[in-house]
Image: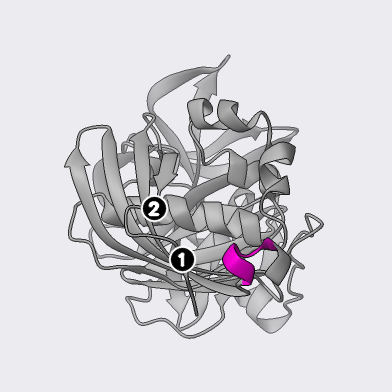
């Protein structure tokens, strides 16, 4: 199972995908639409990815990781499961650690409105599904994929309990086969003024043992991806509203970054409890000498991030330098 960290020019978000080959991951199309950066975490390894194909009418997508990934490769069922079949939804709801929720198939051939389009021939399930589950597998007891989770039911902005939808396995399997045979990679969206060269991807390492360390790393990854891609509005939204207010707006905040971009991040320690935590982080940045501390073009920072849980994600509430100024690489 993979946890997606996707950056658009205006915002960042997380979701789910699953391996169907050493470097092939199935997810929902809305997860990767207009993405400027895509990274996927498999346990302790985070890899960059590109989209091979999407189908908005089915809300399906296939992405390829830059390097092969070790992990369970899922198989699709060849037929739809009957109503009443026991199923389980796998994924990372609300950006939290991996979860499995049980339910049943409650309807077949269901339809659901998504924006200006209608998804049809869907599996309906009463398994508990939340934002962040999108793109994850709905599996039967034999471990096979019966559907790809795409949406939950809303009625006039009021969420309906126990109603969620997945694209059927035969439809997903056919799409994957087609994209493997005839794929045209989707170009990542250019947000403009990206300081980082190439894809702007960077390695994330989490050494801290705290049970929220991985989630904090995920938030920092989204923040850094936004900076590297010039998606400053998205990176700015990873700060708490209180911290945002001290800068005014994303344009003022990003002006202080100059040519700086992130090269690697290591979460070494997380302390605290409840909705407020502190994270000690080793961060390496690169920048023009005019924007670096003491003219540094490459800097190693030992930062302490104050992190706040806002009910759905860990946001950056502040930074400090308790270990001193950055050193040159």
Real-space Cα separation, disc 2 to disc 1, in angstroms: 9 Å
Q: Which residue is mark 1?
A: 326
Count every numbered label the image shows and give the total: 2
Residue at the image position 52 percent from the left and 53 percent from the top: 222
Q: Main secondary structure of the magenta part?
A: helix
Is 294 a magenta residue?
yes
> Would residue 256 appear left or right of 145 to someone viewing this image?
right
Q: Label 1 near label 2: C-beta < 8 Å?
A: yes
Q: Is residue 137 visible?
A: no
Disc on res. 321:
2
Where does the image place residue 159, in percent across and percent down from the top left? Answer: 46, 21
> Would residue 101 appear left or right of 215 to someone viewing this image?
left
> Would residue 255 appear left or right of 112 to someone viewing this image?
right
Disc on res. 264:
none
Extreme residue toward the front, this view:
294
Mark 2 packing: few (<14 Cα in 10 Å), some, or many (20+)?
Answer: few
Q: Is residue 161 above or below residue 193?
A: above
Q: Is residue 215 visible?
A: yes
Where does the image place residue 232, in percent across and percent down from the top left? Answer: 68, 47
- Dot 2: what SS? loop
- Dot 1: what SS? loop
Where does the image place residue 154, in percent across and percent down from the top left? Answer: 52, 23
Where does the image place residue 170, in percent across and percent down from the top left? Answer: 52, 62
Q: Which residues are magenta?
A: 291-295
- Please report whichever mark, 2 or 1, sits nearer to the chain's N-terminal start: 2
């Amino acid at each position: 199972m993979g946890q997606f960290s996707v950056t658009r020019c205006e915002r960042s978000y997380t979701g789910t995908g699953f391996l169907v080959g050493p470097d092939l991951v199935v997810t929902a199309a809305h997860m990767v639409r207009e993405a400027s950066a895509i990274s996927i975490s498999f346990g302790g390894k985070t890899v960059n990815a590109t989209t091979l194909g999407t189908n908005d009418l089915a809300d399906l997508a296939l992405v390829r990781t830059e390097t092969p990934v070790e992990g369970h490769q899922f198989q699709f069922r060849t037929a739809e499961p009957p109503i009443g079949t026991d199923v389980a939804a796998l994924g990372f709801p609300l950006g939290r650690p991996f979860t499995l929720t049980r339910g049943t198939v409650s309807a077949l051939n269901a339809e659901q409105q998504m924006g200006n389009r209608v998804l049809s021939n869907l599996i309906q399930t009463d398994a508990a599904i939340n934002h962040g589950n999108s793109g994850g597998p709905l599996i039967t007891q034999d471990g096979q994929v019966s559907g790809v989770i795409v949406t939950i039911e809303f009625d006039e902005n009021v969420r309906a309990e126990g109603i969620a939808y997945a694209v059927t396995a035969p439809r997903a399997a056919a799409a994957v086969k087609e994209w493997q045979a005839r794929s045209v990679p989707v170009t990542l969206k250019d947000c403009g003024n990206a300081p980082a060269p190439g894809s702007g991807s960077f390695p994330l390492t989490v050494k801290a043992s705290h049970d929220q360390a991985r989630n904090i790393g995920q938030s920092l990854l989204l923040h850094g991806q936004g900076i590297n891609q010039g998606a400053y509005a998205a990176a700015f939204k990873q700060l708490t509203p209180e911290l945002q207010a001290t800068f005014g707006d994303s344009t003022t905040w990003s002006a202080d970054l100059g040519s700086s971009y992130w090269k690697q991040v290591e979460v070494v320690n997380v302390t605290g409890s409840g909705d407020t935590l502190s994270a000690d982080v080793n961060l390496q940045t690169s920048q023009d000498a005019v924007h670096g501390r003491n003219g540094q073009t490459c800097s190693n920072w030992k930062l302490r991030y104050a992190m706040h849980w806002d009910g759905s994600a860990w946001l950056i509430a502040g930074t400090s330098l308790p270990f001193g100024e950055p050193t040159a690489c």
